[in-house]
Image (spheres, rainbow, N blue to C red):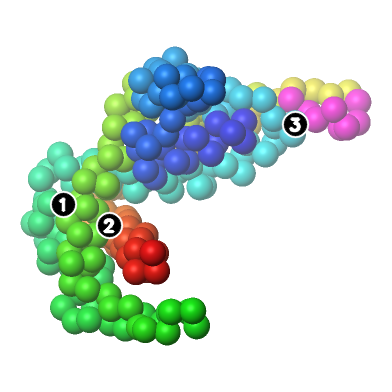
């Protein structure tokens, strides 16, 4: 169950294009997970996986629901072609959001290590690349949404049968507990009707991705200078 959960969480946050499956030692044995539909579908079904203590499955609901809500907000924005509260499309958003990269219009010194005391300049080019790339990176998340909606009940089951763990006192009686219940559909309805919340989730996703991508680019720049 936990491995499937990691897989689903990554797919909800980053899409599946960056996930690979290795079945052998050669490059030919490594394929994109999205190309192995059977493997992908099984991994999305987190709650069909085995768990030592099946009560742990109940604890996954808030986190997975939050990841799904962000993904659904991004999908709504794409479908509408704009952020509901501002009329700004995802493609245009980075150029207008100075909050993603506050220092994009000026150079900022970054402290280097003692082995290379010269300060590293954070250039406009680095900020510009991250702001443009973040749009495509956000859109990569959407490749998983159709698969989820095709099997929503299996991926986000409303209820689940909980088997007592082996160490539970006898008699070990299986019982049914509500899992997601109506929450997934409630999330959809709320985001469809709450423009401000939808905008907030999309903006937050883009800010986070831009910051992550810029940090990676700055690291590469530092390494390139040392080499």
What's the CA distance linking mark 1 and mark 2?
9 Å
Q: Which residue is mark 3?
A: 52
Quadrant holding the C terminus: bottom left
Instruction: Give the residue displayed 34% in from the left and 34% down from the top.
Output: 17
* Image coordinates for residue 226, horizontal then vertical, percent: 39, 69
The answer to whether the residues at label 2 and label 3 have Cβ atoms under 8 Å apart is: no
- Give the label on residue 90, or none: 1
Circle count:
3
What's the CA distance linking mark 2 and mark 3?
37 Å
What's the CA distance linking mark 1 and mark 3?
42 Å
Residue with the most extreme right position: 170
* Residue 151 seen by the camera: no
**Sequence order check, earlier mark of 1 and 3:** 3
In the rendered image, the vertical position of residue 17 relative to residue 115, given as above or below: above
In the rendered image, the vertical position of residue 209 relative to residue 114, given as above or below: above
Instruction: Give the residue displayed 67% in from the left and 25% down from the top.
Output: 50
Quadrant holding the N terminus: top right
Instruction: Give the residue displayed 33% in from the left and 78% down from the top.
Output: 120
């Amino acid at each position: 169950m936990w491995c499937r959960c990691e897989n689903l969480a990554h797919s909800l946050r980053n899409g599946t294009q960056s996930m690979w499956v290795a079945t052998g030692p050669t490059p030919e044995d490594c394929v994109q997970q999205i190309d192995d539909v059977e493997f992908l579908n099984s991994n999305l079904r987190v709650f069909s996986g085995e768990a030592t203590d099946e009560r742990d499955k109940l604890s996954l609901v808030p986190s997975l629901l939050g990841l799904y809500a962000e993904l659904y907000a991004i999908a709504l924005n794409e479908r509408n072609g704009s952020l509901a509260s501002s009329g700004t499309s995802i493609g245009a958003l980075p150029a207008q959001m100075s909050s993603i990269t506050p220092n994009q219009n000026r150079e900022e010194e970054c402290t280097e290590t003692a082995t290379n005391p010269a300060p590293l300049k954070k250039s406009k080019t680095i900020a510009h690349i991250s702001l443009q790339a973040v749009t495509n990176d956000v859109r990569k998340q959407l490749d998983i949404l159709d698969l989820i909606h095709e099997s929503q009940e299996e991926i986000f089951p409303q209820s689940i049968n909980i088997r007592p763990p082996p160490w539970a006192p006898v008699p070990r009686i299986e019982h049914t507990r509500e899992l997601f219940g109506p929450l997934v559909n409630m999330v959809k309805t709320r985001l469809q009707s709450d423009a401000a919340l939808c905008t907030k989730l999309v903006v937050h996703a883009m800010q986070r991705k831009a910051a992550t991508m810029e940090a990676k680019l700055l690291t590469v720049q530092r390494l390139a200078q040392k080499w």
